[in-house]
Structure formats: structure tokens, C-alpha cells
Image (cartoon, rainbow, N blue to C red):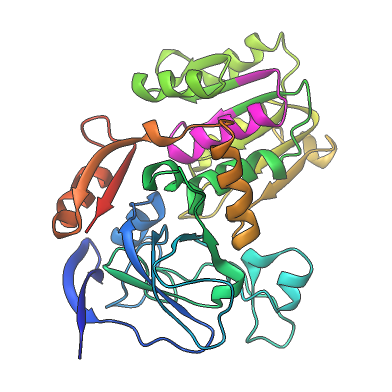
Amino acid sequence: MATMRAAVFVEKNRIVLDDKPIPEVGPLDALVRITTTTICGTDVHILRGEYPVAKGLTVGHEPVGVIERLGSQVRGFVEGQRVIAGAITPSGQSYACLCGCGSQDGPDTRHGFRAAGGWKFGNTLDGCQAEYVLVPDALANLCPIPDGLSDEQVLMCPDIMSTGFSGAERGEVSIGDTVVVFALGPIGLCAVAGARLKGASMIIGVDGVSERMNVARSLGATHIVDFKKGNVVEQIMALTDGRGVDVAIEALGTQGTFESALRVLRPGGRLSSLGVYSSDLHIPYDAFSAGLGDYSIVSTLCPGGKERMRRLMAVVASGGVDLSPLVTHRFKLDDIEAAYELFAHQRDGVMKVAITP
């Protein structure tokens, strides 16, 4: 049996490179040879045991590659074609998909919905930190890479670009809005770019790392708040002359950032939550105006599917955003354990790593 190298979850705090069989291709699947992938903050949650997955699972959910083999029912693609697939791979057939909620895809349930069911790579199916990945429901999920775009130019599309943009979309950012983004990691930086593209006139980024602040400015942040220099809520309220923001995007996943995001909203504002939380959230009585402030709290899971990927790559191809500077470090797959060590501990100014065979 032919084998491949893959990054495998063994136990808490252990992801190792191991040999696994190359997947068999079903009628609706496509086998993609990975040319570039990356590590996500969610992979670090898995590494630390904060998000449970099966032992022996191949991790990773951001594939860029070349079609190696197509299932018998997959039409419109050719072997050797450069493609991406989203981190979310909806079936395209469930009730959730057909009402525009593919991230919550549940084709095997009676009602068609499953919370986070569209997230399969590196969650319920083997992921793409490997030499090959099997893409399910390939007709709904494979998307050709436009000529002229490099792997690193489209590497952010499968997850962080889709997720960050969705934070602005779900927050219903409008022309002229004031927006704050809490935490300028890769997803927060993409939320800044998304808010700019949606027409926000004032975009406040909150972080404490100078390199991230500089990238945020290049992507559209008009103001930066350094949480190390004083009370964040007070700083944001001063910047908005006491009004508060129209939309607050939370991109870290902690009680502190969630609560601060709520406290800086103007009455009737929207909190758009992107963070992956590891414990219960508490909504303070006063920050929520006793439930009388007309606030909206929404969450999102990275939209997927081939049309989402096509649109995101169109933004890149048109020059609407360039996220390739987020790739600060590069590793070979053989060195992925070292890549995790760097990324999980946020050393050496790392933002995103590119993993190649």
C-alpha cells in the first residue's frame, strides 16, 4: 500500500510526522497533492487539547495543491490542475447548505444541520498537513486557481481570509461605519481588510505587538490601540468621542476581549465574534444594558465551498488585498514539528507559516 507523510495528532501537546496510507478516491472525491499549506490557531487549540479530535487524525485545513486523481463522478476538472479547497467543505446538498448555511452542514442528520458540521478537514476527516488530502464532495469544493497567482497569494483564502472577511460581513459593516477589531492575529488582520473593503471609515485595531500593528495599518486600520498602554475600553471610547463603535469584531476568543468588545458598542451596535472559545462566556449586566440596548451578538464559522473560494481569489487577483506578507516563516513538511513549536509559542514575530513538501 502506497503511503504518504502526514502531521498526526497523537495526544495532548503532541503532533508528529508519521506515515499513513494515501487515501482511496471515491466517486465524488478528489485526491489533491499538497503544494503549500499552513498552520492555524485552531490547530494549536487541537495541539493543546482544547479542541477534541480523534487520535491519529491528520491535522490541517488550508489546502493549496494540484489534482492528483479525480473520482468517477467529478466533472469539469482535470488531473494536474492547480486548485484550492476551503477549510469548510459543505456537501452542497443538505438543508443547511440549501439555505446558505453550509458551515453548519449536516447531510447525515434528519434535519440537515450540524453545528460546525462543514468543518471536516483536520476535525472529522484527515486534513491537509500531509503530502495528499482527499477532498470530499469535490464538485462543491474544488476551485481552480487563476493563472498568475502564486500559492502564497491564495494560501489565506481557505480559512483566515474567509473567516476574517466574514467577521465584517456578519457584522454588517456599512459605508462610513466605525469598526474595532480586537486582536490582530492573522484572522483579525483579515477582518481589518474586510472592514475596509466593506466601506468602514474608521477602523481601530487592538493589539500589543508592533509588527501586527504595522501590518494592520497597511491593510486599512486608521487607528491602533495598544492594550499595554492603558484601559482598552477607555481608549476606544476616547477615540470615538464617547459614542462607541458600530461594529466590534472579536478575533481572539477570550472572556476579556469579548467583554471589551461589548462595552465599546454604541447602543444598537453589533458584536461579531470570530474567536474559538475554550470556556463559558459571561455577559455582564451593565455592558449589556440589562438587555435593553438593542445590541446584536453574532458568530461565524469560515464560509466555504467553491464559490466562496472563487470570490476571494477574485479579490486577490484584482489587487483588492494582498495577504502574502502575512507569511513570515517557511518550513518543509519534514520540519512541521518545529513549525508548530514556533507558531504555538508565537516566537520570532511569526504570523503565518508556509509548509511545503
Q: Give the range drawn in magenta.
A: 181-203
Relative to 324, 181 lies left or right? right
Q: Quadrant of residue 250?
A: top right
Looking at the image, which residue is at 71% across and 78% down?
94
Looking at the image, which residue is at 79% across and 67% down?
99
Q: Quadrant of residue 148?
A: top left
Q: In which quarter of the image is residue 42?
A: bottom left
Whether residue 264 is situated above or below residue 170 in the rendered picture: above
Q: Where is residue 293 in the image (x, y as percent from the top left)?
A: 83, 34
Q: In which quarter of the image is the C terminus?
A: bottom left
Note whether residue 259 is visible: no
Note whether residue 6 is visible: yes
Closer to the camera, 79 or 201? 79
Whether residue 188 is situated above or below residue 61 in the rendered picture: above
Q: In which quarter of the image is the N terminus?
A: bottom left
Number of marks: 0
Closer to the camera, 169 or 276? 169
Q: Position of residue 337 (x, y in %)?
A: 17, 56
Whether residue 60 is situated above or below residue 171 in the rendered picture: below
Task: Tell me, yes or no, whether the highlighted magenta stretch contains residue 188.
Answer: yes
Q: Position of residue 19 (x, y in %)?
A: 17, 77
Looking at the image, which residue is at 46% across and 14% down?
230
Whether residue 55 is situated above or below residue 212 in the rendered picture: below
Relative to 183, 131 lies left or right? left
Looking at the image, which residue is at 30% across and 63% down?
129
Task: Tell me, yes or no, whether the highlighted magenta stretch contains residue 132.
Answer: no
Q: Where is residue 306 in the image (x, y as percent from the top left)?
A: 60, 62
Relative to 69, 169 lies left or right? right
